[in-house]
Image (cartoon, coloured by chain):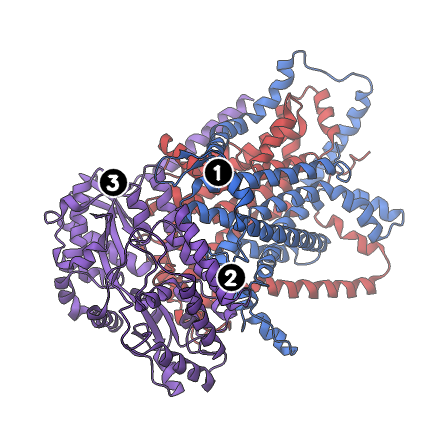
Amino acid sequence: MTDTLTTTSDLAPETERSRIASIAIHTALITASIVMLYPLLWMLSGSVKDQNEIFGQASLIPSQIDFSSYIRGWFGGQVTFGRFFWNSLVIAVLCVIGNVISCSLAAYAFARLSFWGRNFWFALMLGTLMLPYHVTLIPQYILFLKLGWVKTMLPLVVPKFLAVDAFFIFLMVQFFRGIPRELDEAAMMDGCSPWRIYWKIMLPLSLPVLATAAIFSFIWTWDDFFGPLIYLSDVNTYTVQLGLRSFVDSTGNSDWSSLFAMSSLSLVPVFLIFLFFQRLLIDGIATAGLKR
Amino acid sequence: MTLTINRRAVLMSMAATLALGTVGLNRAKAATSMRFLWWGSKERNDRTFAAIKQYSDKQTDVAIAGESFGWDNYWTRLATQTAGGNSPDLIQMDYRYIFEYARRGTLLDFSPFMGKALDIADFGAANIDSGKVDGKLYGVNLGVNSSMMVFNTDAWKEAGIEAPKDDMTWEQFGAACSKLTATKKRRAFYGCQDASGLEPALENWLRQKGKALYTEDGKVAFEAADIAAWFEFWAGLREAKACVPPDVQALDQLTIETSMVGLGKAAASFAHSNQFIGFQAINKEKLDITSYPRVAADAKPGHYLKPSMLVSVSATSPNKDAAVAFVNFLVQNPDAAKTLGVERGVPASEKIRAAMAPTLDDNSRKIVDYIARLTPKVGALPPPPPNGAGENSFLLKKVAEEVAFGKSSAKEGAAKFVEQAAANIKRG
Amino acid sequence: MANHIEDSAGALSAGLRSRAQETTVYKAPTALARNAPGYLFLMPWFIGFFGLTLGPALVSLYLSFTDYNLLQPPTYAGMANYSRIAFGDDKFISSMQVTLFYVICSVPLKLTFALLVALLLNRGIRGLPVYRAIFYLPSLLGSSVAIAILWRQIFDGDGVINTLLWQFGIEGPSWISNPDYSLYTLVILAVWQFGSPMIIFLAGLRQIPTDMYEAASLDGASKVRMFFKITLPLLTPVIFFNGVVQTIDAFKAFTPAYVISSGTGGPIDSTLFYTLYLYQEAFGYFRMGYAAALAWILVIIIALFTAFSFLTSRYWVHYDD
């Protein structure tokens, strides 16, 4: 079902050459993988080292293995790290839902519907990608303060339901435009409303890009530090990123081993989400039979 | 279409419920509730929360919520909250920033509370004045510190050279550092850091020569010739291999873990005394403290005692009396002092220091002893730095790096520094 | 599931294409009815744009004409900020140079790696999900404080890279703390995080219909020809997207420089990215008005570049509609 693209090498009779090519490719990939994995290994190694070993040397092998940093990191603060994980999870899931829904609605409008001013609104939408956030930070903070949303997670979540992430709108527009228009036109013949076309045709055929948007949305929300920094004040509502920063104070004592331990742990949910959604990326929907 | 709106409404209300749910806490509704913001890491947080608990146990109608961050993000958060009119009641302050905040009217003036709710007379005039801006008291001293040299006793012993001690001269120190580098007992290991870009080091040196960084009325108090001499002095140390080369010094980003001693690249670094505990924590070898070397045996005092941090109250706080009472508790209550320890600095109050003496661990004792040794020899507190002074400390680092990397000469660098420093002050 | 949709979509289109030749396209009667669907779908975006984005953006535009120290209300300053940027600010010029260099170096490299690896992984080799996850890992670690320490340990005078070079008898400098080389370490950091555009390329590759490849290979086309005649043209919308977005992101890059240089932009401002400079002005020196002016200059520059990209895209981007 999934390997529709692997058949090309079987068609050619040069199996010997393709085997060497395959070995070469795998070697290259494995070497590259080691380079990619090195930081994770380094972090894991740092998490079991004693703090005063982290800075002097770059070796991966610790002189003794000490898992106490995990305990310290998890239980050490005023609030257990589990609470931070839960907060981050709630916020991230809500943001994913919000982004996927609102951005796909907007992208459908930009990609498929014609209406007065479409290009103008599209340009404005792209414009929102260009503003560095440090500058709208203060006015937005004051706005949320007046709405009474500061100290809650609302400033972090509600904007996602209002399609403020132009990146995803733009991404989906590009993908929607890759789906042949004949499907829309045929459905319109049948009397389908734009909503039905959106729901029954565009979305199912766009699962790869929706999955991509979901993955990125989750990861970026999980990694977002600045938003929680200024909007969450109660330590019980902190996210993982805020919790991680509390281990390090450049002017005083820091607990680096715990930082590495909790950073490593915080990769786990992200990785799981990635593995879960990437099945949708594997099962790419081939749109056979529709080419002119 | 209607389907969309309904679904979205459901989701929105789910979101709202979840949000409100996570906000709700199991805290009893106290008569007074305040927020206290400080920077620090785990150890300081633990100690501070314990002190807060001690206070709430005694004053059951006061609830204090503690918020803490690392230094790097602290000021962004505080500035954002203050700009939005949402600043915390109690704010841990730094000597550099208190002027900015106080002069713009965001902090409470403690003067009316002095002698009544706030009883800090035994701090001594110097320690009280260190929190004053334009004559009014805006910050209460949370800990006294001064500049220090932190050095690696094991490395010096290994090289067979006498370790640095108080009242050494710069010449002796420079010579000792060169000798240490020359013993080559460790790979790529030098005597000391290159402090040409370190503002406290420059200030100490200028003060010993009877000058200063800034004048009373907020102008630059040094000349290009002074700075050129400073840069040339360090160029000499670099040439003699007494201090680290420029591309190693550039690794130092003014944090403990990127210092030359922290990275294991040199046997001596310069920092602030209350950071000693942090230095020892990341270093396997034994460290010790001493003061900056002297320019000449009879030079003026270069050191001064300054607050490592202060605590202030927001001018817009609705709980001013309760906040001041808590401040008094933090600095004058012996139990609180024991809980807080010396990791914020040595307590300014004489009687608190005496009460704490028996409970100190080795590292803390070294700091307290250092301050005690230094106190009779310190000079007066310098005048408050003008606006733009913070920018000048980064400017010094940048120009010193240019000179060290050979991108400009000592004289050119000095002229540039003086000119831009004055411009920064004027711009404010 | 895939086959089901394929079949039904194919049948639908084939069956109805004949009908299209018989009837004319239905057009809605009034302008309102024609425009309504578009506006209704855009409703969430409108609320977000007008409610949450436009307001703060306009406020920041206003602030760029003021002196605003965050702690006191802003005071009007006219064109002072902008004229200082134009005539009196060395750091503006140097940070712009640093940022441009970063954009020009990192974006093409990053996209090239992303595309190459995506093509490799798309061949359906064994272990694809594992490789994909591994290559995406660096992007997950990117904003971590730990990266600064790691990067230093790799790139400093005694770091991993120099140890490797030493095996070949080369004595490398301290890459990360030498102003002549420090920016390259940040470029490498950016390129190392090619996972995001790679994922997007993979999704794009997955959308290319397989029957085109089958038909072409039956015709005797070589793999290289198929790449240039089928894959690349059909991938152009995605290449365009990645190109525009990565460039905008590179202009706005903040976290790498902030984390690696601890917010100093050193040594000697060699890693002072434009937005890092902006951040220093806003939150380090309490000059929010000036920072706002810097931000809007950046917006104009990015907007010019993006407009240029869109205008020239019609010559090489191949959409199916």
Q: Specify the amino acid type for callout 1.
A: Ala
Considering every residue shown, the one lying at the far right of the view is C219
The residue wearing badge 1 is: C80
Q: Kindly check if marks 2 and 3 are in contact, taking CB atoms under 8 A apart as contact.
A: no
Q: Position of residue B130 (x, y in %)?
A: 23, 55
The residue lying toward the viewer, choosing from A194 and B255, is B255
Residue B371, visible in the rendered structure: yes
Give chain A's shade. Answer: red
> What kind of element bears circle 1?
helix
* Circle 2 residues within 10 Å: few <14, some 14–19, many ≥20: many
Distance, label 2 to label 1, CA atoms, is: 29 Å
**Mark 1 vs mark 3: in front:** 1
- Specify the label residue B315 is tagged with: 3
Q: Position of residue A90 (x, y in %)?
A: 43, 43
Q: Specify the amino acid type for callout 2.
A: Pro
Q: Chain of mark 1?
A: C
State which quadrant residue C310 falls in.
Answer: top right
State which quadrant residue A175 falls in.
Answer: top right
- Letter of the chain shown purple in the rendering: B
